[in-house]
Image: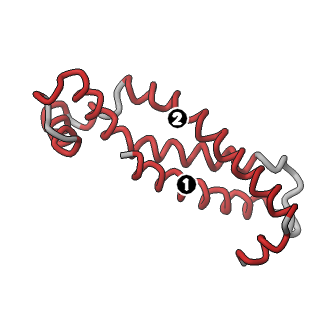
Amino acid sequence: GYFVAGGLGFGTTEACRRLLLRSLEVDGSVEAVAPWVPIVGASLVGVVLSTLGIAPFEASRVRQVEAGDAFAPNVAVGITRLAREEGPGAFYGPKFRTLLLKEVPFAVVKFVAYDAVSNLAFALAPSLSESLQ
């Protein structure tokens, strides 16, 4: 589940960051906002989408921990059983809000820190940036 969430989160964050940077450009530069604003906005979108993707896996995992193997032998069977017996709402109930409260701050800090460290690395070693183009 977290493999799916990671792909959704990173991919969406990067796509949204580029889109936000392009939409904030004025005369070829983005000077109107602080440099961390686009990454925070993008990571918020990315983490919400990734949390939507991970919610079924988390709901199944939590149910398996509560009920043991009697509920389902694996996560895939658990997701199927939850969807069949309780409907899609079982994935996005009160526990979904808790999952968002856990994931959003973590993801925002993670992406802002990653952006700051990578910008510092590229400033210290400009040849690294050139090799990515």
Instruction: Measure the alpha-carbon separation of dots 2 and 1.
Output: 13 Å
Q: Percent from the top left, x then y, of residue 17? A: 66, 57
Label 1: few (<14), some (14–19) or many (≥20) C-alpha neighbours in 10 Å: some
Q: Secondary structure at mark 1?
A: helix
Indicate the position of residue 82 as horizontal and vertical percent values: 19, 35
Judge from the rendering whether residue 13 lies leftward or rightward of residue 100; answer left or right.
right
Where is residue 31, by image quadrant?
bottom right
- Locate the C terminus and report the quarter of the image it occupies: bottom right
Q: Amino acid at mark 1?
A: Phe
Tell whether label 1 touches label 2 (CB within 8 Å).
no
Disc 2 crowd, CA 10 A, few/some/many (<14, 14-19, 20+):
some
The residue indicated by pointer 2 is 103
Image coordinates of residue 8 in percent, x first then y, are 47, 54
In-front residue for pair 107/33: 107
Who's the residue at 14% across and 35% down the image? 72
Residue 69 percent coordinates (x, y): 14, 30
The mark nearer the N terminus, 2 or 1, is 1
Residue name at image x 10 percent, y 28 percent = 70
Q: Which residue is mark 1?
A: 10
Amino acid residing under circle 2: Glu
Foreground residue, 125 or 47? 125
Residue at left 19%, top 38%? 78
